[in-house]
Amino acid sequence: MGTILWDFDGTLADTAPDVWASVAYAAAALNATLPAALTADPSHLSWPLEQLFQQLEPRADQRDFAKFDRLVAKHYRTLNTFDQTRLYPGIQDLLQDLKNRGIRNVVVSLKPQAALDRIVANKGWQSLFTAVYGIDWFGPQATKTTAIRHILMDTHYPGPFLYIGDSGTDVSAARANGLMCLGVTYGDGDVAALRQQRPWQCVSTVAQLKAKLLGKEQENATGF
């Protein structure tokens, strides 16, 4: 028994193409585009939205940033069909194996709750998770750190707990709550930033992740 808290983007699912689609929608409304070299690298999705706005070609008037921000949110929350979002190969079987062993799979994502719910429902993934939490479920000022804290304090998921993510923020948020973080480098996160935060361990493939969670090694390491 136990509970795994999962990041979503870049950890469970490849969501980058659909996120870029929402950014492209907003850019087009300003008669602009983003450089192909920039969108080819999914790690750029970790940039603040204003930094992406500053890369528009032709360069947009700074006064249009509020409109750009609003349009990205509108498309992602209400128009995006998430056709290109996919669980990484092997993740669905891993989640099912964990569930069969009585382990709770709980998503803690920086995505808006409405978008996260739509993705999970549209893809038919509800049965894989005990719960899915978007960042705004915890309030307008929530961070990954405070979201994890709320889950640990206000829910009754059984311990022990482990956090799994692909970013340095995931590691620091887990550490701030007294949790180990297993880092994954197969997604679209900044690997250097992830390693700089010194996660408990890192894995570079889903097969390695499965071995850590379901193999003999993890029985001693995590207590699941």
Image: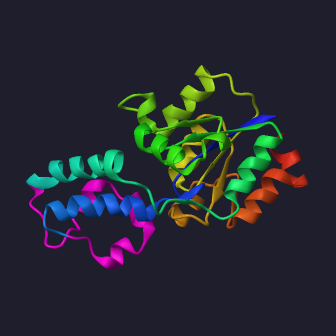
Is residue 35 in the magenta section?
yes
Q: Is residue 37 visible?
A: yes
Q: Which residues are magenta?
A: 33-62
| Residue at the image position 57 percent from the left and 37 percent from the top | 176
Left or right side of 64 for 205: right
State which quadrant residue 51 falls in. bottom left
Q: Position of residue 213 (x, y in %)?
A: 79, 51
Instruction: Residue at 75% x, 65% y: name it.
Output: 207
Residue at coordinates 13% horizontally, 67% vertically from top-left? Answer: 31
Classify residue 144 as left or right of residue 218.
left
Q: Position of residue 212 (x, y in %)?
A: 79, 55
Q: Nearer the viewer, residue 91 or 186?
A: 91
Q: Quadrant of residue 175?
A: top right
* Residue 110 in sight from this viewpoint: no
Q: Residue 101, image x and y in percent? A: 83, 41
Tell me residue 168's x, y (percent): 53, 54
- Is 108 left or right of 217, judged from the image as shown? left
